[in-house]
Image (cartoon, rainbow, N blue to C red):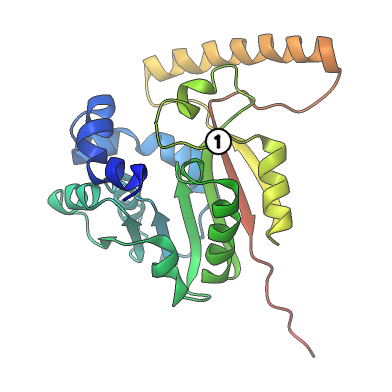
Amino acid sequence: MTFKDRFYRSYTSTHITGRKGEATLQRFQNEFATWDKHYGRLLPTKRDARILDVGCGRGGLVYWLQQRGYRNASGIDLSAEQVNTARGLGIPNVQQADVAEYLAGRRGHYDALIMRDVLEHFTRDEIVELLEICRSAIRPGGALIVQVPNAESPFFGRIRYGDFTHELAFSSSSLTQLFNVLGFEDPRVYPTEPAIAGVRSLLRSVLWTGVKAFYRLLLFAELGRGHWIFTQGLIAVGRVPAAVTRG
């Protein structure tokens, strides 16, 4: 047993619940505005699309997808404790599985794979191997969507070192490099900015606009022009090239 096996065995009770509270459908619903903002535009337009949340945890994102009409949305997680939590909340199509073993027999099966807060748990060699497996499981024209800690954020260490099982953080440049090398088409990287869903989140959004301007000024003073993302998380999407039709 590796240290990660030991940690994942009680991941919910020793790490997640203390930070996020007990899982409830209401808690997940409170996140819908954020997930709409961060992921809504990246998803397939067809509601019968096959979408798999890899490392689905307690099932919140799967529940959101299903509530948004994606009836073929499902999730897998290595932690039996987290999967049991999702099942206890009545969220369907969530099961315990190792991602490599699960996707091995599902070549070209999915329209989209989502990996939210997953890749940072692996080493570089493991990430390359894992994403190659993921790419083979996505149909031509389908998408891989990932969310990871942003090493360019002034506060990146809060996430990078906030979990003992994390291995690394990423930047816009390294994510784009990774996607390009593995054959994903036209990779795009986005910030995880606050979503406006009320007065409090509106205030946060206004404050964040000022914070961004300050950090951009600092980098401009050193580097001149450039495009920078400062949020503690990054979201990246890349697509598997569409099949070429020969006439």
Farthest residue in the front direction?
A: 1
- Could you tell me which residue is drawn at 72 percent across and 38 percent down? 173
Q: From what the image shows, is residue 224 above or below residue 170?
A: above
Does residue 67 sit above or below 240 in this rendering? above
Q: Nearer the viewer, residue 22 or 80?
A: 80
Residue 79, x across and y down, in percent: 27, 50
Residue 183 occupies quadrant: bottom right
Residue situated in front as seen by the camera: 30 or 122: 122
Question: Which residue does the numbered mark 1 point to in the structure image?
Answer: 168
Residue at the far left: name it. Answer: 88
Q: Quadrant of the C terminus?
A: bottom right
Residue at screen point 18% across, 38% down: 24
Residue at 53% of width from left, 63% of height from top? 134
Point out residue 169 in the picture as x, y percentages from the top left corner.
57, 34
Q: Residue furthest bottom?
A: 247
Q: What is the x, y in percent for residue 5?
A: 31, 48
Give the residue type at disc 1. Leu
Q: Image point 27% across, 40% down: which residue?
A: 11
Residue 103: x %, y % from top left: 44, 69
Count of picture labels: 1
Query: Alpha-carbon neighbours of circle 1 within 10 Å: few (<14), some, or many (≥20)?
Result: some
- Badge 1 element: loop
Answer left or right for 170 relative to 28.
right
